[in-house]
Image: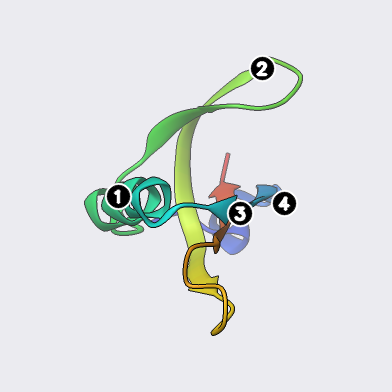
Amino acid sequence: SASFADTGTPPAMWEIGYTGLTKEQADIFDAFNAAAKRTHTFNFTDKQGVTHSNVRIQEYDRNHEGHKSWAHSVNITLVKYD
């Protein structure tokens, strides 16, 4: 995989977070994360509507507050090296 040292260009990064998800909704993110496995790239459209190719998942975290098992949160950090 490419890195800043390889390309000389800083990576583009996005942090995305969702809160208040149902278990079923969070399971969809889990399935996508498992399929991507941090080695497969995909296209990502940012909030300005720009589509970026060769994006990877850098970090993935899912949790819920112990007393709120119905309210899950997912945090994803995406990265793209040019």
Seen in the image, is 80 located left or right of residue 14? left
Mark 4 or 1: in front is: 1
Q: CA distance from mark 1 to mark 3?
A: 23 Å
Residue at horizontal 50%, vertical 69%?
A: 61
Specify the quadrant of the image occupied by residue 6.
bottom right
What secondary structure is marked by label 3? strand
| Residue contact between numbered discs 4 and 2, judged by CB atoms under 8 Å | no
| 14 on left or right of 71 | right
**Quadrant of the frame with the N terminus:** bottom left
Residue under numbered circle 1:
36
Could you tell me how far apart the alpha carbons at marks 4 and 2 are, in whole angstroms? 18 Å
Which residue is label 4 attached to? 10
Marks 4 and 3, Cα distance to the nearest angstrom?
33 Å
User: On the image, numbered disc 3 is attached to which residue?
Assistant: 20
Q: Earlier in the sequence, mark 2 or mark 3?
A: 3
Q: Residue at x 36, y 58 (%)?
A: 38
Residue type at the position of mark 4: Pro
Mark toward the viewer: 1 or 3? 3
